[in-house]
Image (spheres, grey):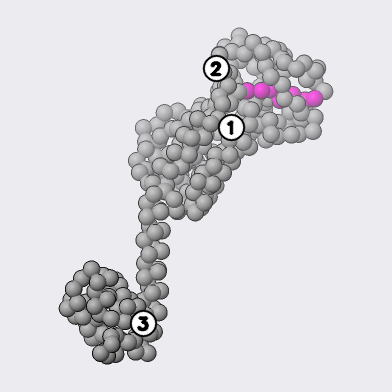
Amino acid sequence: MDLRHLRYFVAVAEEENIGRAAARLHISQPPLTRQIQQLEEELGVTLFLRTPRGMTLTQAGELFLEEARNIRALVEQATERTQRAGQGKLGRLDVGIFGSAILDAIPKLLLAFRNRHPDVKVVLHTMSKGEQIEALRQRRISVGFNRMLAPLEDIGVCQVTTEGLLVAIQADDPLARQPVIRFAELQQHPLILFPTGARPSFIDKVIGLCSTAGFQPTISQEVGDAVTGVALVASGFGVCLVPDSATTLQFPGVVYRTLADTPPNFFVDLSCIYRKDDQSPLLGAFLETVEEFKKASPAPPRA
């Protein structure tokens, strides 16, 4: 039995006439009659009573009509779901996340993707930069988010947004009384840096900015993430340079201030990373959302 048999059977059952069913199916009557006879022989039951007025379903035929309609509905559903998956509109997307961008840009981007593709299940995995690269190569995730990734032959990089930098300062520090702080004034304050782990990282970015400004920073602590860094600022361990997105962290006793006389490149990029050989429609649909999000996100002026 194949799907054609079911389609022919349903047409005859609904039309109750071979001639009308043949016209509906755009075939002649003899092959349709043979198909119905073959179906009855295969099932070993009589599906229709032949009368001068047409075709009437037997009790077995009525049951088979119900089942045939169910089967056809399931096939149509499977066809539609398969087509939607092929268009990147259905499936599961595993995403590696890490860093301060999870406080702002990444949730906004994921929400934009979910609104466009509500039937795609997005699963988040907290991973360091090195863990994301390994997971991409092992196909455990489809995309990741990170900063300052060294070029890799098999990993594609799509910039998502660019963020300016601010300084987190303890509220009772004299610097906090200034609405704008000169970058060189940070020379007198110990710096809390993040994240530890694979290099290059944001740590190297901050040290490089200080070097360009003409001083070597006094490093108080190197910590795993922005949350820990800002928490240590609140405890008086020093000051911390953070991307704009980290300012959503509101700790008692911590304020954020802009900086003047900053070195060139006083910003940090956030990028989406993926396997270059991944041709899945789902990844393609996600990268389309990334491009639209990037266009809609204003970038700070680059010095």
As drawn, the label of residue 149 is none
Question: In the image, is residue 168 part of the stretch drawn in magenta?
Answer: yes
In the rendered structure, which amino acid carries the disc numbered 2? Arg
Q: Earlier in the sequence, mark 2 or mark 3?
A: 3
As drawn, the label of residue 196 is 1
Quadrant occupied by the N terminus: bottom left
As drawn, the label of residue 302 is 2
118, 190: nearer the viewer: 118
Image coordinates of residue 173 in percent, x first then y, are 80, 20
Q: Which residues are magenta?
A: 165-171
Which quadrant of the view contains residue 38?
Answer: bottom left
Residue visible at 51% across and 31% down? 294
- Extreme residue toward the front, this view: 53
Q: CA distance from mark 2 to mark 1?
A: 26 Å
Q: Is residue 268 visible?
A: no
Mark 3 crowdedness (10 Å alpha carbons): few <14, some 14-19, many ≥20: some
Report the side of 51 relative to 153 (left or right).
Answer: left
In the rendered structure, which amino acid carries the disc numbered 1? Thr
Image coordinates of residue 198 in percent, x first then y, are 52, 32
Q: Earlier in the sequence, mark 3 or mark 1?
A: 3
Residue named by callout 3: 64
Quadrant occupied by the C terminus: top right
- Extreme residue toward the top, this view: 214
Q: Secondary structure at mark 1?
A: loop
Residue visible at 27% across and 76% down? 20
Report the side of 16 relative to 217 (left or right).
Answer: left
